[in-house]
Image: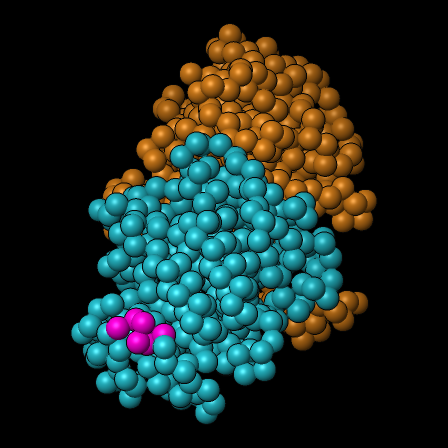
Amino acid sequence: MKVGIMSFAHMHAFTYAGLLLAHPDVELTAIWDDDFERGDNAAERFKSTFYADREEFLALDLDAVVICSENSRHRDLVVQAAEAGKHILCEKPIATEIEDAREMIAACKRNGVILQIAFPVRFAPSISRARTIIQSGQLGDILAVKATNHGQMPGGWFVEEPLSGGGAATDHIVHVMDIIRWTLQTEVKDVYAELDTRFYDIDVEDCGTVSLALESGAIATIDPSWSRPKTFPMWGDVTLEFVGTKGTLSVDALKQSSTYFNDQESKVQNLGWGDDMDQGLIDDFVQCVKIKREPSITGEDGLRTLEVVKAAYQSSTAKRTVPLERVHV
Amino acid sequence: MKVAVVGLGTMGKVHADAWAHIEHAELVGVCDLDRVKAETIAESYDATPYQDLSEMLEQSNVDVIDVCLPTYLHKENVALAAQAGKHVVCEKPLGLNVQDAQDIISVCEDHGVQLFVAQVVRFFPEYAQASAKVKSGGIGKPGVVRLTRGGGFPRAWEDWYADEAKSGRLILDSMIHDFDWLRWTFGDVERVMTRRVSRSDEDRPLEYALVTLRMEDGTIAHVEGTWAHATFHTSFELTGDKGMVVHDSAVSAPLSVSLHHNEGDASKNGVAVPESPLNENPYLRELKHFAHCILTGSEPIVTAYDALKAVEISQAALESAKTGQPVVLAKMGGGVR
């Protein structure tokens, strides 16, 4: 199948490109980017063809596109790709506005194309194993979840609100929120959040905590902070602890690593050796397009997590718990 | 300095043992409703057993009463000790609510006796060290700090921990430790938001809470309290713009014993039992410090006012658990300014 990539603004595009290039069923035939140099370099690196003209790119006989633009540009690119009949893997978060996400979902439905959101954490074997254990009922009823998705401050457009839609809350709530929904099969009832900018001189929030009541009766918190120090031995973490009536489960998606005391660079590093979750994501998407099945991570999954992000901002400003009002799709 | 302990549950026994190891203190009496328990403990420390506090106050010529009774009994028993002119050490939480804590402080003031509250976490070396590190600028400007404390549901005399009216349960009884440490380290609390779940299943009661605090200095704190885990553990992660300090009791225990055979319980074969031995345990450090303050008149590391403020934060957290909304401490009814 022929796949193209739209924009290398998000660094994950480079990982996805490498995986697509290596995939036996995929030809990475085309790359479009609004940044000529970036797109041209990527095309050279991944043995593909660069198109500076978006219409020309969308007129190609591509089966699918992977969209890795800045967050606020997801909407236009997804809608245009859908109208051109391409199946879509869109980087998270789905969009920066709820209305944008609705439009994207509607455009894909109208044009009969797959819209999958890139939540690779679902493909970490430790995470899917945790889900299996929880759904087997071994832990009894789940009463609470304590989650973190910490990182380092990414800089660039991630800290420019018009392009990113926000800082750490936008960047890091959605991954673990998706895992909580996916695992517990429940939705968020109300949201309280404390968000702030305390680590860097930037115009978006870089830290906080989000506190949730779920419709199942469980409670949850998510820490999305860009709080990892420069000396932290890896980029961040993805952890969840589930408290059930019959036991507890904690999972750390990046824990499969060895510790490297690197004298040459005067630092201590974690060398991850777990399975590559991005590989799982790309393989799943390619298979989904190939057999035309429902995507394992839908546009609605993206939308529901974005609604939590938006409610978190609202709560943090209002200093109150706000009910989550889910929009219809 | 003659000391007597009233209430010989888990903490009363720990305190009695600590007093017996303090040079300038003499454990002269122990008091518990359970006569056999009082006699057994009295015998091991060469003290006199009592079943009634008033009797002990009349007969023992004691200088300090250490109150290790369930929380709901603090007020009347501290009052008895204060009225008898004895200095008081009181187990945390000082009272069930701000009003009780205030009354306890007042009765001690009225009778000119000193009051020390056993907020023992300030005497745990890892917590004291981390607090000093933060205060000296070691992590720069604090960002988000995360603390965890807990284990199984506590079971004790008449199941008093399970009764919120007697113990304040998890939030007042256990999470108060972290609230006090936060206030000690970062200053006063602006607002508190609680999420709490509990199950009152006879065989396996559970309680679990996730509390978000915004400190007046802007620091965001996340405190996990659990009576829903299999084993006791504590941890903290303190982040700031110039560094991070992390601690986990499950990781820092320097000694671990794992036996091939546990007689009579095959299921426990090979289960590692970790230990973190110190020359002086935190309870001994704490009571030694209080003894020093009584003898010298110096200000303690944790004052009765600090203990009252910790009760206030806990009360706000309990209030938030009920309403599902954050509680601003300055606006709290019955609050202390």
What's the magenta region? A53-58
Residue drawn where x is 65% and y is 16% of the image: B76
Residue B235 versus residue A158: which sits nearer the camera? A158
Q: Where does the image place residue B231, in percent across and percent down from the top left?
A: 62, 55
Chain B palette colour: orange
Q: Colour of chain A?
A: cyan
Q: Is residue B275 above or below residue B127?
A: below
For the residue pair B50 and A48, the one nearer the viewer reads as: A48
- Total labels: the figure holds 0
Residue A213's x, y, as percent?
Answer: 60, 43
- Give yes or no for residue B265 being in the magenta stretch: no
Which residue is most to the top? Answer: B110
- Identified at 45% across, 74% down, the residue is A86
In the rendering, at what x and y percent does residue A246 appear? 72, 57
Q: Please indicate, yes or no, whether residue A208 appears anywhere in the rendered image.
A: yes
* B177 to the left or right of A28: right
Q: Residue furthest left?
A: A37
Spot the residue most to the bottom.
A24
Q: In this orientation, does residue B149 appear? A: no
Comparing A121 with B80, the one in front is A121
- Tell me the quarter of the picture where residue A95 sits: bottom left
Q: Residue at point 56% right, 42% down?
A: A325
Q: Is residue A171 above or below residue A271?
A: above
